[in-house]
Structure formats: C-alpha cells, structure tokens
Amino acid sequence: MADLDPTRRLCTLFAEALELDHVTPDTDFFLAGGHSLSALALAVSVEEAFGVRVRVRDVFESATPELLAARLAGLAPGTVPSAAAPHRPPAAAPDIPAPGSTPPGTAVADATRWLWLERQRAEGDFGAYTVPCLLHGEGPVDPGRLRAALAALARRHPALRTVFVEFRGEPRAVLTDDEPLFDVVDVSARELSEARFGALVDDRIAVPFDPATGPLTRATLFLRTEARWSLLLLADHLVCDGRSLEILARQLVAAYADPSAAEAPRGPSVPRSTDPEAALRHWREVLLPSPAPLPLPVRGPRTEPAGATTAIAAQEIGPEALRHLTDLGRRHHAGPFAPLTAAVARTLAGLTGSTDICLGTPVDRRALLGAEDAVGFHIATVPLRLDVRADTSADDLVRHVAQRTMDAVDHSEVAFDALVAALDPPRSPGRPPFFDVWVALYPHIDTGPCAPDGIALRGGPTPLRVGMFELSFQFVEHAHGMRLVLQYDTRRYASDTAERIVQRLVDEVTLLLRDPAEPVPAAESAHQAFGGFRFDA
C-alpha cells in the first residue's frame, strides 16, 4: 500500500473495518454502519498503517477517509507512545508445582485480576460470574460432530482450557489439557412448554463454576424434536465475555462443517502500546469530584451486596423502533447503544431528580490487545458520567452519550480496581464505587444460512438468576427486534417498581424517537411515579 495516497489508503482501511467491498473518500463511517467497537478496530489499523497515535475520538470527529486524512496530516509521525508494556492474554503454563516453589502458571491481566478478586470477595452464589448463551439450531445435528468441533475450538483458544489458582493472594492462570464439558439432553419424548424448557435451561445455568478446577466451559445440546434443537453454552466470566459468545458460535459452525477450520493458526498478537497515566488524567477530570449516589427507589437500606437474588422485568422494542434508534445513533456517529443509554439516563434522572447520572458499562478491548477473534475475558468496566438536564434535546443528549462512550473506549486501559484505587472515591456499603446502575447491549448472534450437511446457530445471552448490580439494563437484540431486560435485586426493589421503571424507559425511548416538531409532554415526576416508596442514598 506504499504507493497509495493517504485518502486512498484510508478508503481501503474503512472498507475493511466496515466489511464492505469499497468506500469513497466522502463515505461517513458511522452512516455506513460503523459503531464504537468497529471504530476502535479502525483506529488501531490506521495507527499501524500510518505510525501515529489514532484515537476513537479522531474517527468520531473525522468520520470520512478524506477528513481523517486531513486530521492525520496534522499529527507528527512516530507519536505512538511506548508507555507501559500492554497486557497479553494468558499464555501456556506448566502444571501446578508444590507449595512454596516457583509460582504456578502465568500472571493475569489487570482486568482479569480485578474480576477474580471481586469473585473472592463475593458471598454465597457465584452464578453471577457465569456467561450464558442459548442458541437455537438449524439443520440436522450430529452430537458427536458437535462435541468434536467444540473440543477443536478448545485447542485453538487457550482460554477454554485455563483455570485460575491462588498464589500468595494473587490469581495465576494455568493451562490444562481439559476439554469443555459436553452433554446431550434428549427431551424429544416429552412435550415441553417454553416455560418448562426455560426452567430446564435455568437449572443448568444455576450450577456455578470453580475457577481453580474447571473446566470453565460447558455445553448442553437439547434435542427437542426431530428437527428442533438448542445449544446452551456456559462459561465462567474469567474466560469468556459477550463477544466471545459470538466468536464461539461462528467458529463452532465452521468447525462442524470442516474440522480443519478450527485448527487454522491464529495471526500474531500485536497489542497496542498504552498510556495508563494519560488515561488516569482523563478519568480524574471526568470522575472527580465523585458523582453522588442516586436516590433510587429502594425498599430499605443497602446492607448486603447487590444482586444475590434477582428477577427481571422486560418489554419488547419492535424492529421499526430499533431501526429508528439505529438511525438516530448513526447521525451522531454511534450505534444503537448511545440512544438506548440516553433513554436509561433520562429515566434515572426523572426517577431521582438528579442531573448527574453515572452508569457502568463494558468496553471490548480486543482491537487494542491484538486479539480480534480470541475467546476470553477481554473487556474493561468503565463509568459513563452524563449530564442529563430536562431542557437537553434528544439529539444533544445522544451526541453527549456518544462522545462520552468514545472517550471511555480511548481510555479503557486502566482496570476498574486500579481506577478506584487511584481516585479513591467515597465508599458506601452495598454498592460499587462511582455507579449503581449497569447498562449493556448484546447483539443478536446469527451464523448465517445453513450450509448443506452443516448447521446454523441463532440466539444470544439469557438472563441470570443472580447478578453483580442492583439494577442492570440489558438490551438484547434478536431476529425480530430487541428485548429490553431490567435485571433487579429483589431485596431492594419491589416487582411493581421494576415494572414501572421499565415502562418509563419505554416511554423515554418513544420520546427520543418523537418528531422534533411535536410537543413533548411534561415528564412524570419521581413522586408521581413512586409515591410512598422510601428513597435511600
């Protein structure tokens, strides 16, 4: 590509990130289907090609090849900082030695260490640390071939064979030869209703993993009728995240059709250099002074950890509304996450009377780690601090959320526990630092048409009985739209309170999509919606 001018080189990189045959110099990355995750991948590829530091914000503010070329012209070559050595996924490790000898296995990334420590501090049920995915199959399935395909993927992805042992108070990753557990449950002789099948799935999900013994991945094939089957994939969060589920489903289908596909060598890992000090400076500016706890409508004082017992309240967002949400996000250089999060922020502002709303959300860091197709735990927890005022227009709020999300991605190299330690915010019992509410978007998993003598998988994550937060807004895309799921702590919130929160969120989504020329009805006050409930900070 050395003979190409910068704009033409960028057109090629844009097309690769968007998975398009070609783009023109004036193609807007986000209007063409880009979002924060693909913008991160583009930023990394542009940085590698041009040898200058490129942020997601650069793509956000210069969203066409010609605009980004002009922006890059103002950056000095060789400005990629060396900084601290980046973290790499766990590598192969020897067997566990005798106590007191050389440390077992390998050290883990900071984000994995934080998750392991959180798990050690947790009490009771560890089911909140399970990543569940229910996929519905198409095509005649051979259980033996499916088992062999999953075993082949475990050989390709070390995370699926990794366990975690404690050494002097710290986690160490140890690679094993274990294959994921695989079993077949034939329920074709029973006429199971969807509710009874769901209960069967929930029972499997409820069995926690032991990080020290493993295997930390399980699969259950449910044979429901002659032509109807489902696959439940379960993994411990230490070795799996939401994106891993999509990678596993896609590669499982490929390995089922051609076993050699799972043995294809993976490309070299080239992690991007990081600048933790710059990231901490950013977070100090954004998070200090710390956001005040939201006066949410809980039933009593928060005396115990959140999420020990949860339930869900849910509503559907239809395909037409989802299309409009996606279009709204693209107008502001984002995907549907930005308008959905804006609606959550408005909902919480209306409930609490606060204009300072801080949410927690996951950021996929694979592009930064050089691990695009790797299964494992490659996410960072980041706070999104938002200024939500009653007179802010929908467009301005969505733009604000999109900008804060891009900045969070750009400064996600600091693990959450390191961020908390550095900023030292005030602590309250029974709640995490900085935020009370979690928000996440889960894209629909669809491996495409079923090939002859092959299979196809479609589905996505399924809610847990336990959680890590008192309120978790989960937006789960599916083939016919999106499901809005509020997972709530039943010891802190009554079921009718949760239902009202969900309905209010649906109303806020409707308001975001309203024609700007139409009058906006006055928002219902927190006391009107929740009169009689006790607020507790």
Image: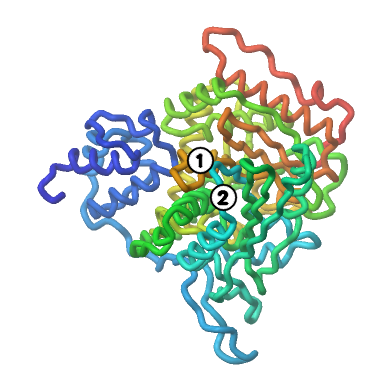
Seen at 34% across and 47% down, the residue is 43
Q: How would you rate the neighbour count of disc 2 (Cα within 10 Å): few for under 14, some for 14-19, many for 20 or more?
A: many
Percent x, y of residue 486:
71, 37
Q: According to the image, label 1 marks what residue?
A: 446
Seen at 56% across and 70% down, the residue is 162
Instruction: Tell me which amino acid carries mark 1.
Output: Asp
Residue 181 or residue 161, whichever sits in front: 181
Residue 248 or residue 536, whichever sits in front: 248
Say if 432 sits above or below 158 in the image.
above
Percent x, y of residue 58:
34, 41
Number of on-image labels: 2
Percent x, y of residue 82:
33, 64
Say if 499 sits above or below 247 in the image.
above
Q: Which mark is residue 54?
A: none
Seen at 61% across and 37% down, the residue is 476
Residue ranking furthest to the left? 3
Q: According to the image, label 2 marks what residue?
A: 141
Seen at 51% across and 32% down, the residue is 336
- Considering the numbered disc 2 on the image, is that residue within a helix, a strand or a loop? loop
Percent x, y of residue 340:
58, 31
Say if 462 sits above or below 241 in the image.
above
Q: How would you rate the neighbour count of disc 1 (Cα within 10 Å): few for under 14, some for 14-19, many for 20 or more?
A: some
- Considering the numbered disc 1 on the image, is that residue within a helix, a strand or a loop? strand
Q: Cα distance, mark 2 to mark 1?
A: 17 Å
Q: Earlier in the sequence, mark 2 or mark 1?
A: 2
- Residue 167 is drawn in which quadrant? bottom right
Residue 295 seen in the figure: no
